[in-house]
């Protein structure tokens, strides 16, 4: 039997049994769609989170107070300090060879007001280097001035949303605003950038770190970002920083340094597991579709027993009979898979429209894999009925009295 | 015993079925020779083994014992694939219940054996056209089986049986579902084909149909009770 004739023969059958075909097609389409949608969402989420961390360069170390023994899980993001990291510690680190920049960080919520308008905003105390390390761009004005760590100056940079909320349509640059007991002059307005590491920079205010110490009445630093000149000496530099801090903290190693890589790999592990779990759930729906295919094929075999008998009487070999059933199943599976992929792409396109910051895309392996799995599932589950049909003796199949007469 | 024109030879052929504890001998040591171009009818009461004999000759069933030689090929040696090839190339079937595929048109039903044999569409067309014209089905060719009368359906089934130009045409109660006019029409068509050289074997209940054949087999309890040739001219030409 020629391939074109085989396809034509099956298409006739599929067309004739519209309802049955539509049900089967939608079952396959839904399971393929589930795989694609779920991996698409999983991948989108993963890319989003990884993108967030990538805002920091690879050559940036993050130091936090406190030492925690970790067992390969996420590094401690909230360390319990036995001893504060001071600005002088940060200065000492900045003098190390491979270190190109150091940005100390103190952060908290603070009531910010201008005239009669006031609101609570995320207040960051840091320095000029912070802008570079966090890749913050200034839309108007300029970044914080280059100052020695311990020198305070009453200037600030604010996020675009905070600017709008406090100043409305009026110009903000050069204006004074009040934070707690202090007054700051606005020297820069940040470019709209969205969230980074969970901080919404659009709603933040950045002041010199020494001012923040006074504002929060706190000497210890919350974080220190350390930018290295090159990645080569990363391990060594990390050791040197730890040694330096140990020396400065009377022989006690009470800080934790995390690297971009350790953070990323920890998150990537979690997210990969999540994507796989989600794909597994979708796989179950594929199994359900497979069993449906088998049931439908078994019913088809028993309904078409007389036809099978006829085909055999006409000299159709057993393998052609099996091929007819298998090819019908794979035509359904391929079309169902295609439909499923199209629908999932459409839905992800709509989702990207609603959440432009999250890159919802199904990776190629998921699309290809789901179509492949659908086809293999269809073939596997159709194999038993097909074999059953092929193995019937012609006379038994012809004499089947269950089917109606044509 | 076996002449040069012998097409079919059954040697001590048996077919038995196990029904419960009982062993039913549907065919009980049958010896039979059929020459090319013969016209046989097989009659006998229900359960006498007529249909089993036809299925056996059509290679649709396997003997329990004995041998069936088709064109001197021992068929018991063949596997299902080999038997399928013989069926495809040498044997046409006409069934009582037509066995047409309902979703295919009359033309497509006739075309089916050519499709299964893997013949190219270009070569198929003239063959089908010829058969359709021959069977006077030209204006019914595009109809589905359920839009055709019983006689027309059986003509379509006959067209399908002869499209591969078989040597042997086996008809199992071909008129069983038809009124007498349609039945006569169908049997005359089969006889015409026999006149053109095809070997025809008709299994029937109908004495009038059975009597038309030149050679009449009567079966009782799985044995051939009588084998009579009425027309000596036919036998002599066959010899």
Image (spheres, coloured by chain):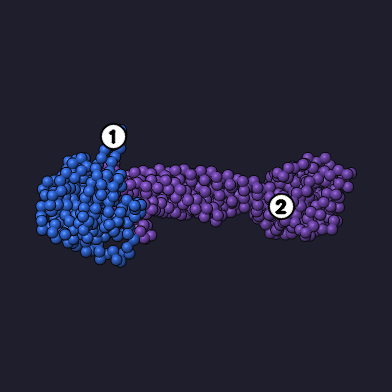
Chain colours: A purple, B blue
Q: In front of the other: label 1 or label 2?
A: 1
- Give whichever of A124, A23 is nearer the camera: A23
In the displayed orientation, state which residue is furthest to the front.
Answer: B1
Q: CA distance from mark 1 to mark 2?
A: 80 Å
Left or right of residue A245, residue B239 in this image: left
- Give whichever of A291, A57 is nearer the camera: A291
SS assignment at label 1: strand
Determine which residue is flagged by label 2: A261
Q: Which mark, by number, is residue B22?
A: 1
Q: Is residue A187 visible?
A: no
SS assignment at label 2: helix
* x 59%, y 51%: residue: A43
Left or right of residue A362, residue B18 in this image: left
Q: Quadrant of residue A192?
A: bottom right
Circle 1 crowding by C-alpha within 10 Å: few under 14, some 14–19, many from 20:
few
* x 16%, y 50%: residue: B41
Q: Chain of mark 1?
A: B
């Amino acid at each position: 039997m020629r391939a074109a004739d085989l396809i034509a023969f099956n298409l006739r059958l599929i067309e004739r049994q519209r309802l049955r075909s539509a049900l089967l097609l939608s079952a396959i389409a839904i399971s393929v769609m589930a795989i694609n949608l779920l991996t698409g969402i999983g991948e989108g989420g993963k890319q989003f989170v990884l993108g967030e961390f990538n805002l920091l360069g690879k050559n940036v170390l993050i130091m936090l107070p406190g030492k925690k023994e970790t067992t390969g899980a996420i590094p401690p993001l909230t360390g319990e300090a036995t001893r504060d990291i001071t600005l002088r510690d940060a200065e000492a680190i900045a003098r190390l060879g491979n270190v190109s920049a150091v940005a100390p960080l103190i952060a908290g919520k603070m009531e910010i007001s201008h005239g009669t308008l006031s609101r609570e905003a995320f207040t960051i105390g840091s320095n000029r280097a912070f802008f570079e390390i966090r890749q913050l761009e200034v839309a108007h004005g300029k970044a914080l001035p280059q100052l020695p760590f311990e020198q305070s100056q009453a200037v600030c940079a604010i996020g675009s949303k905070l600017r709008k909320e406090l100043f409305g349509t009026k110009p903000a640059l050069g204006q004074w605003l009040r934070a707690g007991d202090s007054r700051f002059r606005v020297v820069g307005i940040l470019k709209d950038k969205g969230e980074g590491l969970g901080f919404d920079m659009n709603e933040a205010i950045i002041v010199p770190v020494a001012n923040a110490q006074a504002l929060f009445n706190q000497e210890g630093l919350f974080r220190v970002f350390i930018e290295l000149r090159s990645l080569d000496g990363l391990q060594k530099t990390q050791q040197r920083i730890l040694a330096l801090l140990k020396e400065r903290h009377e022989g006690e190693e009470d800080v934790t340094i995390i690297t971009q890589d350790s953070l990323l790999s920890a998150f990537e592990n979690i997210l990969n597991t999540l994507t796989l779990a989600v794909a597994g759930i979708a796989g179950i729906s594929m199994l359900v579709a497979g069993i449906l295919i088998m049931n439908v094929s078994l019913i088809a075999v028993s309904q078409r027993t007389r036809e099978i008998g006829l085909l055999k009487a006409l000299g159709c070999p057993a393998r052609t009979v099996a091929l007819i059933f298998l090819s019908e199943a794979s035509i359904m599976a391929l079309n169902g898979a295609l439909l499923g992929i199209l629908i999932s792409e459409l839905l992800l396109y709509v989702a990207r429209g609603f959440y432009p910051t999250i890159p919802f895309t199904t990776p190629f392996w998921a699309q290809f894999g789901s179509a492949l799995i659908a086809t293999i599932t269809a073939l596997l589950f159709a194999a038993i009925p097909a074999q059953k049909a092929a193995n019937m003796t012609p006379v038994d199949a012809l004499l089947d009295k269950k089917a109606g007469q044509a | 015993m076996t002449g040069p024109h012998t097409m079919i030879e059954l040697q001590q052929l048996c077919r038995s079925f196990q029904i419960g504890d009982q062993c039913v001998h549907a065919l009980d040591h049958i010896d039979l020779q059929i020459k090319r171009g013969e016209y046989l009818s097989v009659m006998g009461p229900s359960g006498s083994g007529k249909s089993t004999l036809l299925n056996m000759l059509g290679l649709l069933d396997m003997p329990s014992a004995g041998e069936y030689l088709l064109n001197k090929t021992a068929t018991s040696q063949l596997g299902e694939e080999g038997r399928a090839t013989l069926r495809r190339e040498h044997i046409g079937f006409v069934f009582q219940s037509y066995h047409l595929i309902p979703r295919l048109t009359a033309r497509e039903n006739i075309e089916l054996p050519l499709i299964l044999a893997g013949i190219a569409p270009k070569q198929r067309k003239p063959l089908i056209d010829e058969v359709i014209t021959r069977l006077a089905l030209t204006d019914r060719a595009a109809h589905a089986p359920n839009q055709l009368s019983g006689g027309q359906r059986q003509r379509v089934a006959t067209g399908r049986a002869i499209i591969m130009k078989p040597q042997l045409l086996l008809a199992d109660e071909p008129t069983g579902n038809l009124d007498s006019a349609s039945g006569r029409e169908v049997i005359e068509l089969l006889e015409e084909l026999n006149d053109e050289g095809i070997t025809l074997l008709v299994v029937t209940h109908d004495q009038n149909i059975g009597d038309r054949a030149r050679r009449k087999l009567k079966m009782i309890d799985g044995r051939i009770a009588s084998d009579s040739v009425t027309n000596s001219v036919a036998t002599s030409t066959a010899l």
